[in-house]
Image (spheres, rainbow, N blue to C red):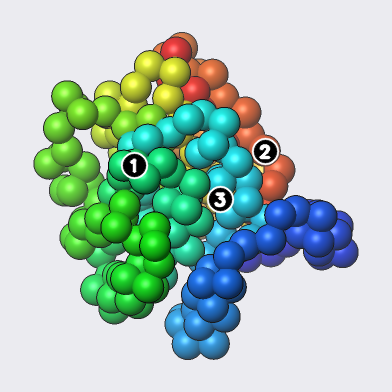
Amino acid sequence: MKAIVPKLIEEYASAHTTSHSALLEELEEYTLSNCAHPQMLIGRLEGALLRMLVCISDARRILEVGLFTGYSALTMAEMLPHNGELISCEMNTESAQIAQSFFDRSPYGHKISVRLGSALDTIKTLDPKTPFDLVFIDADKENYSAYYEATLPLLNTGGLMLADNTLWSGNVLKPQAQSDRALVAFNDRVQHDDRVENVLLTVRDGLTLIRKK
Ligand SMILES: C[S@@+](CC[C@H](N)C(=O)[O-])C[C@H]1O[C@@H](n2cnc3c(N)ncnc32)[C@H](O)[C@@H]1O
């Protein structure tokens, strides 16, 4: 991932942001030392933003698409009320096992339920009668538009959808790879959708906030 925000600015912003828990620190260190593609983890600055959004939106039910080793799920679960719930979709068994081992050690881990398998298949099994307050999309970029269409009906009116990596290292300006083109198509779809209000934040690799009207 090519940094969009200058490194020193990113570090300064991190240093002036509420720190994460000791367990999240451990999870981040474990992922950096032991897992392939550790840059997939959202990190402490974007994590703190997600925590803030969970709080100010008063979210109780969250759907996550893309668990990896569990950093974003755990940071959001820490801010949910005691009876809150976060369902996270992941297709990689090994990543899910690492994530679960950290959730088992957290007083907030009981709120998280991991669904193994293709996220689109998992989403089809979710009951629209129990909608979500917040959806976080952070899996394969080629399916972002499909995740958007599949999860928008599951979101409460006024609910918030967050989509990560929407600037994709700046590649959206000059799309070449399939993932670049998929993100351009996703960003255009959201921008022209009357069902939502949206803002693309230049945080880390781009984070789009989408509110269902
Ligand atoms: C960017 S990582 C998620 C990072 C995580 N949100 C965090 O901040 O720690 C994307 C994850 O999505 C998973 N993934 C990719 N395609 C998927 C699919 N079709 N269904 C379910 N999970 C998928 C990958 O295995 C990977 O662990």
Question: Which corner quadrant of the image does residue 155 belong to?
Answer: top left
Residue position for label 1: 84
Question: Which corner quadrant of the image does residue 114 belong to?
Answer: bottom left
Disc 2 is placed on an element classified as strand
Q: Residue at x 62, y 28 (%)?
A: 199
Q: Give neighbour class at mark 2: few <14, some 14-19, many 20+ (Cα, 10 Å).
A: some
State how far apart marks 1 and 3 are (Cα): 26 Å
The picture places residue 103, in percent across and down from the top left corner, at 36, 67
Q: Residue at x 40, y 67 (%)?
A: 106
Q: Looking at numbered disc 2 in the image, what kind of residue is underneath it?
A: Leu
Q: Looking at numbered disc 3 in the image, what kind of residue is underneath it?
A: Asn
Q: Residue at x 41, y 41 (%)?
A: 81
The picture places residue 201, in percent across and down from the top left corner, at 67, 38
State how far apart marks 1 and 2 are (Cα): 27 Å
Q: Is 108 drawn above or below residue 37 in the view shown?
A: above
Which numbered circle lies on residue 201? 2
Asked whether mark 2 and ligand 1 are closer than 8 Å, the reply comes as no
The picture places residue 58, in percent across and down from the top left corner, at 48, 30
